[in-house]
Amino acid sequence: MRHIKDIPHERFKIQLMNYNSKYILKIEIDQFEQLYKIGELEVTSLDAIEKMVTPEFLKNCLNRFIDMRNDWHAAFQNS
């Protein structure tokens, strides 16, 4: 996997990578991460991918991270 660039953000670690003819958008917070795979032919440029990372998209990512954390805590307590 080849690291292309970091996308600065105050809350998340956001990286753009390339692997097997796909761009991979990786968003991390604490021990959780979300990956989005985008075919190289689906976008016209790296700027197009960065434009997809809108405040609304990141708000939805945060909600998913909260759900992931809640699921993890529930699973951990049940073990």
Image: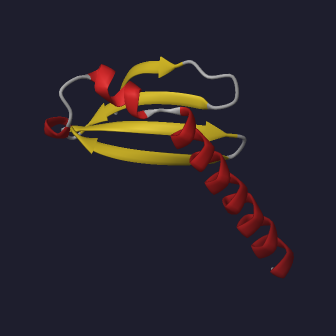
Q: Residue at x 49, y 20 (%)?
A: 6
Decide if residue 2 is in sight here. no
Q: Farthest residue to the left: give it.
A: 41
In the image, residue 7 lies at what x, y percent? 50, 21
On screen, 61 above or below 4? below
In the image, residue 59 lies at what x, y percent? 62, 43
Labels in figure, total: 0
The residue nearer to you, when weighing 60 against 32, is 60
In the image, residue 41 lies at what x, y percent? 13, 37
The residue nearer to you, when weighing 79 against 50, is 50
Q: Which quadrant holds the N terminus?
A: top left
Q: Farthest residue to the right: give it.
A: 77
Q: Farthest residue to the front: give it.
A: 56
Q: Is residue 30 left or right of residue 16?
A: right
Q: Residue at x 55, y 40 (%)?
A: 56
Q: Is residue 78 left or right of residue 62?
A: right
Q: Residue at x 69, y 62 (%)?
A: 67
Decide if residue 10 is in sight here. yes
On screen, 67 above or below 76? above
In the image, residue 54 lies at what x, y percent? 49, 33
The residue nearer to you, when weighing 7 against 20, is 7
Q: How is the image coloured?
A: secondary structure
Q: Which quadrant holds the C terminus?
A: bottom right
On screen, 71 above or below 51? below
On screen, 13 above or below 41? above
